[in-house]
Amino acid sequence: MRKLQLEYGAEIARAVVNFEGPILFCIVGRYHGGAYVVFSRGLNDNLRAAAVEGSYASVIGGGPAAAVIFPREVRARVAADPRIQALRATLKGNPTAEERAAFDKSRRDVTIEKRAELAREFDAVHSVERAKRVGSIEEIIPAHTIRPYLIDTLTADLARLSKK
């Protein structure tokens, strides 16, 4: 399926566009990328999107954003980290292979830490609350209300559509 993601995504989008009944979409964890685009009321007025409190919704997730969109920011944070600055100061002159290896390992560890830090910051901004403000989702619901929310929404949508 990995090599056919675009084809399957196009089929899902086509199905969303052409479906004539109610569509309920509930985000229970993370909702990014193609799903963010495909499950849109812009494609079908009968689509309802809700998210469970604490879930995430954006075009790209924090981890991929930190790795792909903001690598320069990650590198700057690593370079500014006091641990890296202190280690760099000890490498002046002609460092041994062991000193260089220790520095490289520390830099990798700090890079992972800084990437995760930036990912958390990105996810905090690109929350389901933001997705609701920009109209990507309609409701944010507590986890314990998923089932009644879906039943009530489906019942109301079926009633509304049957009157058309």
Image: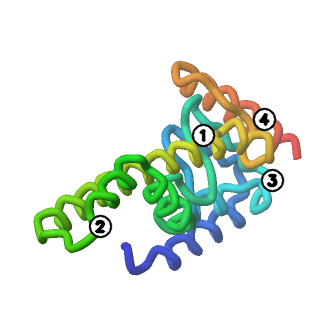
| Lower position in the chain sequence, tag 1 or tag 2 | 2
109 and 122: which is toward the camera? 109
* Neighbours of disc 2 within 10 Å: few (<14), some (14-19), many (20+): few
Q: Measure the C-alpha gap from mark 2 to mark 4.
A: 75 Å
Relative to 164, is 38 on the left or the right? Answer: left
From the viewer's perspective, is the residue at label 1 or at label 4 nearer?
1
* Residue at numbered disc 3: 45
Disc 1 packing (10 Å; few <14; some 14–19; many ≥20):
some
If you read the primary sequence from the N terminus, does the residue marked by circle 2 or circle 4 appear first? Answer: 2
Lower sequence index among marks 4 and 3: 3
Closer-to-camera residue (146/109) = 109
What separation in Å lies between label 1 and label 4 (alpha carbons)? 37 Å
Camera-nearest residue between 10 and 55: 55
Left or right: residue 57 versus residue 103 is right
| Type of the residue with mark 3 | Asp
Percent position (x, y) of residue 9?
54, 70
